[in-house]
Image: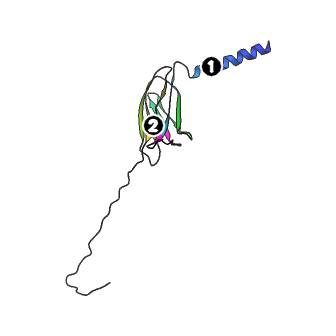
Amino acid sequence: MKRVLAVLSLLFLMSGLALADGPETGTVSGKVTNAQGESLPGVMVTIEGERGAQSTTTDESGNYRFALLVPGGYKITGSLEGFKAATAAATVSAGSKIEHNLQMNLETAETITVTSEAPMVDKFNVSAGQ
């Protein structure tokens, strides 16, 4: 009898976990890469919707995942120092599993300005100097 009760309790708990990512919510996942297709670990990925924003960091393979998202429109943004921010739009429906891969390009925001001045010439001084 104890075994039957233990098995029923385990099944009850497992069904709750299976329904946590169930038909009334959706997931968005993907991979962040650079322009050469290499994985980018440590990218801050943010997803914004009507109910606020969530953030996560990509793993060592460049993967991210957001679960338990209510249906609606979302904006996904990836940011990493030295790279231009990458954005994507996603529409989550009940029970959907959407994959959005982000590609980030290097940012070239540096500007180099070279200025020079001509030396002042004194036309009344005819001596040579070093």
Say if 46 sits above or below 95 in the image: below
The residue depicted at 46 percent of the width and 34 percent of the height is 101
Overall secondary structure of the magenta stretch? Answer: loop
Screen quadrant of the N terminus: top right
Residue stretch in magenta: 33-45
Q: Amino acid at mark 1?
A: Gly
**Where does the image place residue 12, in percent across and percent down from the top left?**
67, 16
Toward the viewer: 37 or 122?
37
The residue depicted at 56 percent of the width and 39 percent of the height is 59
Number of the label disc, if any, that sits on residue 65: none
Say if 110 sits above or below 71 in the image: below
Number of the label disc, if any, that sits on residue 102: 2
Residue 76 is covered by the magenta coloring: no
Q: Which SS class for mark 2?
A: strand
> What separation in Å lies between label 2 and label 1 (alpha carbons)?
32 Å
Residue at label 1? 16
Q: Amino acid at mark 2?
A: Leu
Residue with the most extreme top position: 1
Residue 39 is covered by the magenta coloring: yes
